[in-house]
Amino acid sequence: MIDLKLLQKDFDGVSAKLIRKGVDANLIEELKTKNKELKKAKSGFEALQAAQNSMSKEFGVYKREGKNISELKAKVDANKIKITDALEIQRTCQEKLETLAMSIPNMPDDKVPDGADEDDNVEIKKVLTPKEFSFTPKEHWELAEQNGWIDFERGVKIATSRFSVSFGMGAKLERALINFMLNFNSKRGFNEVSVPSLVNRLALEGTGQLPKFEDDLYKMEGQELFLIPTAEVPVTNLFQDEILAEDKLPIKLTAYTSCFRKEAGAAGRDTRGMIRQHQFHKVELVTIAKPEQSDAIFDEMITCASDILTALELPHRLVTLCTGDLGFSAAKTIDIEVWLPGQATYREISSISNTREFQARRAKIRYKDGGRNSFVHTLNGSSLAVGRTLVAIMENYQNENGSITIPRVLEPYIN
């Protein structure tokens, strides 16, 4: 959640940053109205409280001097009722502002480039050079069918569209990738954790998926439980409403989970193959850090995810997301896009985001900062999306006869 104290102190500065991120002007105007109502309510309460303090002092003087206090007592009693009413008005205004603020995205960092959508993202660098094929490379769904690795029709038969079933070497490679990524991340200092695939509403509010993106989530009928869209949700919320010891930070974690998304806003996009599935496997990185640590750890997480692709000898590039393409909770994001020769383009395989205090404020994750409690910074990123990594292996390691060579680093994992 955005900092409401900062909002009240510098509304114009906060609103300018929200406008950069594409927040609707009407929503900002509503935010301004709710903010003014709260300031007015606070001012009214404080004025009544000051009057009460003044009359209390006067009350003591009257008693010492033996004056008649009945009239003053009546004023004091009447003011007490007004204070109670004013406090309730202030509480209601605060609640309305906080409710509205839950639907407001994070402010982008100042160095995030301006832009409307993914077309305005900025490439940072390319890593490894794409292979030149002596034949026209096939797309992954052709290779999957030819090698019997992935069956899309059976996925539809037992579920619905955008589900698939992996067989034989396809299934073994998925398992190999998961183990390889977890081991790789562990060697980089990220502690492995296994978490539930179902979370409650409070957890999704904490990381910013709710209330805004409920239509994209799978919900358990009759229960306030949701299938996770990413391991970021359960792993970050492990520390929900906690005050952490300063010497325990940073906390660096990695987790494998299946992820579930309705892809409600992606109708007609990537309908073939494994690029955009309702269920997919992912290895995640999450870090809970002190504010002064988060920029260095952000770079560390990007390097970790990029180095996995380098170890797999998969060409990729790093891209800075512009303001219009930033996720709801992110202050800044670097996407890693892997080269797919069958499509002759780079496709996203990882997003590494620093949310600053945004998620920590929503989830109430703090640490002992000397004598006070301060909000941590939370960071998250894919390391990597397993299905898309398998797609990249199929397309980059394909041979002219349609067979697929196994990357050397994965050979120990598939016997």
Image (spheres, rainbow, N blue to C red):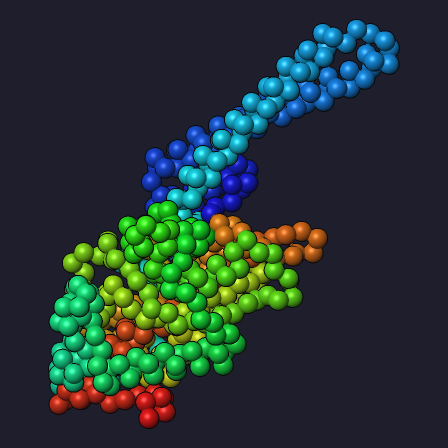
Q: Residue at x 66, y 56 (%)?
A: 369
**Which residue is at the far front?**
222
Vertical position of residue 402 compared to residue 41: above or below = below
Q: How many marks do you count on the picture? A: 0
Q: Residue at x 30, y 52 (%)?
A: 221
Residue 45: percent from left, percent from top: 60, 25
Please state if 214 lies on the left or on the right of 395 as rendered. right
Picture quadrant where residue 344 is located: bottom left
Specify whether residue 336 is in view.
no
Vertical position of residue 198 compared to residue 44: above or below = below
Vertical position of residue 313 compared to residue 242: above or below = below
Specify whether residue 240 is in view.
yes
Residue 135: percent from left, percent from top: 13, 86
Please state if 24 lies on the left or on the right of 44 as rendered. left
Q: Residue at x 37, y 51 (%)?
A: 224
Quadrant into which the C terminus falls: bottom left
Q: Nearer the viewer, residue 269 or 339?
A: 269
Picture quadrant where residue 87 is located: top right
Please state if 15 lies on the left or on the right of 245 as rendered. left
Vertical position of residue 229 compared to residue 310: above or below = above
**Which residue is at the far right?**
65
Residue 406: percent from left, percent from top: 27, 89
Q: Residue at x 16, y 58 (%)?
A: 268
Residue 350: percent from left, percent from top: 35, 68
Q: Nearer the viewer, residue 263 or 193?
A: 193
